[in-house]
Image: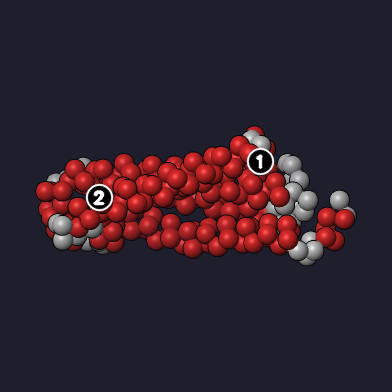
Amino acid sequence: MRGEISVFRPVEAYAETGSFRTHGVVAIISFCLFVGTIVFGFVPVTREIETSGYSTADLQEATTRTEVDTILQAFEPVMDSVVLLSVLDYLFIVAGFFLFFSLHSLVMKRLSFDDRLVLVPKLGMMLTVCSRLLDSLENLWVILIYSNPDSYSTTLISLMNTTQSVKWLVVAVEYPALGLAIVLVLLAQFTALFDVETSQM
């Protein structure tokens, strides 16, 4: 399994670095940060921003300079909250990265008896890398726009829109991939479905 597909070596190395218990602890901690950032960060800060009449989602979906300028002008009284939301977004990205990587690592250890089944968590980890990078870029374009409202390049609007669209396409596959990986582990653990594969090892 090791080294057969070199593109998977980084994710294999991550899974192999820690024990089952270590990945479990990382998953629990990152899950708490992931959920905590949403409940205690995104929710109250977004409510504060929405008092302006717009949300950062509206900004990310704006496609013209006129729309963006209108939203930025409305954001002026709550700009501190907009900045805070950007910081929280990066915390959310990091927490999500470690959560998904650790969960997939646990799955990889459980499915290590079959080279085909273990490809599911490996692909899931690659999707996680892509989605978190895209999310980071999307957040960066937003920051570059609101930090320079008078002279930002209109190219940033196109970059923001495109990055957001691609990100959601990746996420639409990333989450089901994690779900499938977990289902495979449950099937391997509680059914005889994969007994044939296990007996061949």
Q: On residue 12, which mark appears? A: none
Question: What mark, if any, has residue 20 been given in the picture?
Answer: 1
Report x, y in % for residue 57.
28, 59
* Residue closer to the observer: 26 or 98: 26
Which residue was labeled with disc 2?
Answer: 45
What is the three-letter code of the residue carrying label 2? Val
Which residue does the image show at 57% across and 57% down from the upper left?
178
**Residue 122 percent location from the top left of the image:** 63, 50
How far apart marks 2 and 1 lie (CA) works out to 36 Å
Side of 160 relative to 167 (left or right) = left
148 and 89: which is toward the camera: 89
Q: Which residue: 42% across, 43% down?
A: 33
Whether residue 144 is visible: no
Residue that lies at the very extreme toward the front in this rendered image: 190
Q: Classify mark 2: residues with Cα within 10 Å, few (<14), some (14-19) or many (20+).
A: many
Q: Report x, y in % for residue 7.
A: 64, 45
**154 left or right, relative to 169:** left
Q: Where is residue 105 in the image (x, y as percent from the top left)?
A: 63, 45
Residue at 22% x, 61% y: name it: 64
Crowding at dot 1, Cα within 10 Å, few <14 / some 14-19 / many 20+, comes out as: some
Label 1 sits on a secondary structure element that is helix
Q: How is the image coloured?
A: secondary structure
User: Type of residue at label 1?
Assistant: Phe
Which label's residue is closer to the chain start, 2 or 1? 1
